[in-house]
Image: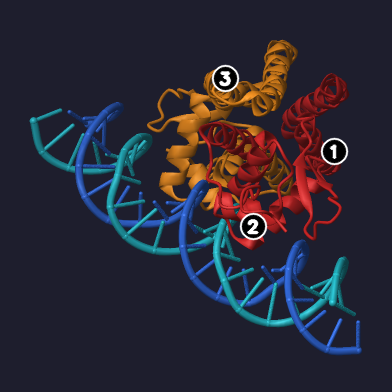
Chain colours: A red, B orange, C blue, D cyan
DNA sequence: TCTTTTCTTCATTTTTTATTGAAGAATCTG
DNA sequence: CAGATTCTTCAATAAAAAATGAAGAAAAGA
């Protein structure tokens, strides 16, 4: 059992905690993640010891559902790890400090699939354009070329970015 | 006046239009822009001739307000230009095909300001950490170092990305 | 196996974000 | 400058996204 002294429960947030949390809320929002996920990761990032879900619920004042789902997401992108603590019933969580995980997940889960679908779309657009009369066709192909150009550029850039991120 | 034949009003969307629109909705959403902005840019991107706000309202079935605000935003990032058409009362709009404008605007308006604020935050975090006792301080500085590391990495990367985008 | 604790899921509610459309400002035309 | 047209703004509404918490599943211990 936790002694009264060692319990991290119901400790309130330090200024350091709050700075970290606000920072991650802001950055993670950028890649489309909800506030609660930023809060959870932010707190875990600065926490000197692993925290339980209860700690998070308690200190961040978020619901059980938000905590569970947020941790699930963070685990799925590898940004949070479970630390099994012998003699403790609950799971304990720590932040993986490798921030590139977020960017990598964003690229993998958001950007790449869209690019994939865009390539298919471009194929269909070319088929449509071929049915047009000369003038319209010329303009259409010009624009489609532009799209292809940017797609290629994106695809050339991505591996480079990933390599840069991984260090 | 528009002749009955040349009027582009109330023409419905071709499959090509729809592919382009869906594509831009999807990509612009990625950088936090609303659907209506994607629709507007998508249609302008494939339109062979400049369109008026009315054309957009008509063909996309969006409200006057959405059209006006969407065009304002797109103009502000340089993704749409006004083409003055002699003898025509209304403004005519064309898409700037330089897609990098979106990425550049995103970096300038979203990413950079956040990085700026993050740097300030990190300064405050260091001040807070200095007030902690030894053990906690050591851990705190370790994490703060990590943040600084990623900030530097980001800031090194950005100009490179921008140069790459501009071509 | 039964009981207790911890965690997950998901229907509902809340919050946030985007859209609408009417009022009125700005612009053009004669 | 009056009248008509076009465009912008913004309060109200609608739509989308996130958070809540209760029901129950999974896991651990007795």
Q: Is residue B75 visible?
A: yes
- The residue lying toward the viewer, choosing from C23 and A153, is A153
Structural crowding at the residue carrying mark 1, measured as other residues with C-alpha within 10 Å and reported as few (<14), some (14–19) or many (≥20): some
Q: Residue at x 64, y 57 (%)?
A: A66
Marks 3 and 2, Cα distance to the nearest angstrom? 33 Å
Chain identity of mark 2: A
Q: Residue at x 52, y 21 (%)?
A: B124
Callout 1: helix, strand or loop? helix
Structural crowding at the residue carrying mark 2, measured as other residues with C-alpha within 10 Å and reported as few (<14), some (14–19) or many (≥20): some
Same-chain check, marks 3 and 2: no
Chain identity of mark 1: A
- Residue A121 point in image, percent of width and height: 81, 43
Against A95, residue D16 (above or below) is below
Q: Nearer the viewer, mark 1 or mark 2?
A: 2
Against A115, residue D27 (above or below) is below
Q: Is residue A131 visible?
A: no
Where residue A27 sits, quadrant-wise, is top right
- Residue B97 point in image, percent of width and height: 66, 24
**Tag 2 residue:** A66
Instruction: Identify the mark at residue B130; answer none if there is no mark.
Output: 3
Where residue D25 sits, quadrant-wise, is bottom right
**Tag 1 residue:** A119
- Residue B49 point in image, percent of width and height: 59, 31
Callout 2: helix, strand or loop? helix
Q: Earlier in the sequence, mark 1 or mark 2?
A: 2
Same-chain check, marks 3 and 1: no
On the rendered structure, is D2 left or right of B104? left
- The residue lying toward the viewer, choosing from A116 and D19, is D19
Chain identity of mark 3: B
Asked if the residues shown at circle 3 and circle 2 are in contact, with their CB atoms under 8 angstroms apart, the answer is: no
Structural crowding at the residue carrying mark 3, measured as other residues with C-alpha within 10 Å and reported as few (<14), some (14–19) or many (≥20): some
Question: Looking at the rendering, in which quadrant would you find the N terminus of chain B?
Answer: top left
């Amino acid at each position: 059992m936790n002694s009264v002294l060692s319990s991290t429960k119901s400790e309130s947030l330090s200024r350091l905690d709050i700075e970290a949390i606000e920072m991650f809320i802001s950055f993670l929002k950028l890649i489309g993640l909800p506030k609660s996920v930023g809060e959870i990761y932010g707190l875990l990032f600065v926490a000197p010891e692993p925290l339980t879900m209860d700690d998070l619920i308690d200190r961040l004042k978020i619901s059980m559902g938000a905590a569970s789902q947020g941790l699930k997401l963070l685990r799925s992108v590898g940004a949070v790890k479970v630390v099994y603590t012998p003699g403790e019933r609950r799971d304990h969580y720590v932040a993986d400090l490798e921030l590139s995980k977020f960017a990598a997940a964003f690229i993998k889960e958001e950007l790449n699939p869209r690019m994939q679908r865009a390539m298919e779309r471009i194929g269909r657009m070319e088929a449509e354009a071929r049915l047009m009369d000369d003038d319209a066709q010329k303009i259409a192909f010009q624009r489609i070329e532009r799209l292809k150009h940017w797609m290629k550029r994106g695809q050339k850039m991505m591996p480079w970015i990933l390599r840069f991120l991984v260090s």
